[in-house]
Amino acid sequence: MFVGIDVDAGIAVTGDADSVRPPEPLSAEVAEYLCRVPERVDGLVLALRDQHFDAAGAVHRETLYGELADGLGLPLRQFVPRSVATAASVEQAAGELLVCRTDAGAAEAVLCRASGQVVASLNAAWHPVQGVTRATVPVEPTGRAALLLARARMQPRYRAAPLHTPGTMTVGAVLDAFAPVEQALRAAVSDVLARGNAYAGQEDDALRILSDGELARHPLTFDAIRAATGGTRPRVMEEHAAALGALLVARGSVRSPATARHSVSLRVHRLRRGLLVESDIPLTVPGGAVPMAVLEHGHAVTVDVPETRRADVCVRASGRETEMPCPALRGGRYRLGMHTAGNGLGVLVFRPDGGGEPVLVPLGGPDGGTTGVTR
């Protein structure tokens, strides 16, 4: 059985190599849910918010890795951004897809590209929204709300018309409450399209728009997306779209490789014929996978940190060597892992071989590292 989970939405989709079962809400934390599944899990992929794929978000990913892969021994194959998973759920996806996620607290736009079986993120923009909740921007499940909202934009007399919502808000009140969301969404879409060769205004089949999030079906969300994309009508995604896309990645129907952009290695000392010599442990190579667990011949690569002195982490990235102090790295044996960190070199993880809290070391940008931090 293969499993795809949208962690933030709390939705799982399972299936085998040829079929997909109906989505189900998680009735517990991810680890507890997976402990209860009656079948063997052959592949697991987790979809996370796109903001969790920077250096700071590596802490969240490592926590999940420790619970599921290290703790339960589950075949956690990959973390994927929720936007990429949403795009991956679209059948026969090809070309560019703009994933617009609209929530009461934030608006996000991510430009993805689908080519063959590969889906990847090209660029993204995220804008926060202050002082708005879903209750302040209610919407009717009919076309009446959309009609009244559209008319009120052109004719102020319609602003006093009531909407049949909890509390019976007026059209004007909903327009005013939604204004910060609309501003953030239009800004996010405009930012992404400005960096994505200005797709706005082209034919519908040149750029498909996917509307996702808790406000995806709001008529004002539609209006904001149309205004920012030159009139392109968005496709509203089902609530389980990201979990479905994660499942497709888990079983190999779609690929969303977390590839490295830089060559990074860890400098260590080895004993050879009684002499202490320097050596490099390769961590990533350009175009290769970013390994959540660094392996050699199928076995975990380990390093021994001496008890007698403070450990320094020395990495070589694209030919440049950088040394970073890591005072929290105590003496002992550690397994190595890596997490992606946006456009940077990644986050190096030292996992105590006998158990305990891992130590995460952000490696910074391509031109050098930053001071190591711990979880």
Image (tube, rainbow, N blue to C red):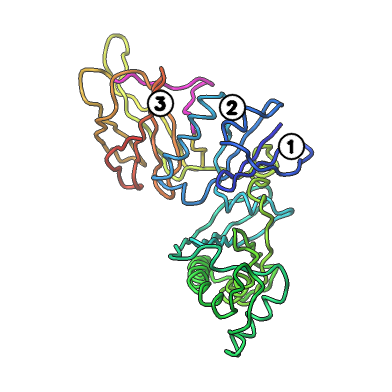
319 in the magenta segment: no
303 in the magenta segment: yes
Residue 15: mark in rendering: 1
Picture quadrant of residue 308: top left
Q: Which residues are magenta?
A: 292-305
The residue at 68%/73% (across/down) is 203
- According to the picture, the residue beneath numbered tag 2 turns out to be 74
Q: State yes or no: discs 1 and 3 in contact (Cβ < 8 Å).
A: no
Q: CA distance from mark 3 to mark 2?
A: 17 Å
Residue 121: mark in rendering: none
Q: x, y (%) of residue 180?
A: 48, 71
Label 3, secondary structure: give it: strand
Q: x, y (%) of residue 144?
A: 71, 77
Most extreme residue toward the right is: 18
- Decide: few, some or many residues near mark 2? Use Cα within 10 Å; few <14, some 14-19, many ≥20: some
**In this rendering, is residue 47 above or below 33?**
below
Label 2, secondary structure: give it: loop
Amino acid type at circle 1 is: Gly
- According to the picture, the residue beneath numbered tag 3 turns out to be 351
Left or right relative to 210: residue 125: left
User: First in sequence: mark 2 or mark 1?
Assistant: 1
Amino acid type at circle 2 is: Leu
Is 88 in front, or is 63? 63
Left or right relative to 104: residue 11: right
The residue at 22%/26% (across/down) is 310
The residue at 59%/84% (across/down) is 160
User: First in sequence: mark 3 or mark 2?
Assistant: 2
Is 78 in front, or is 277? 78
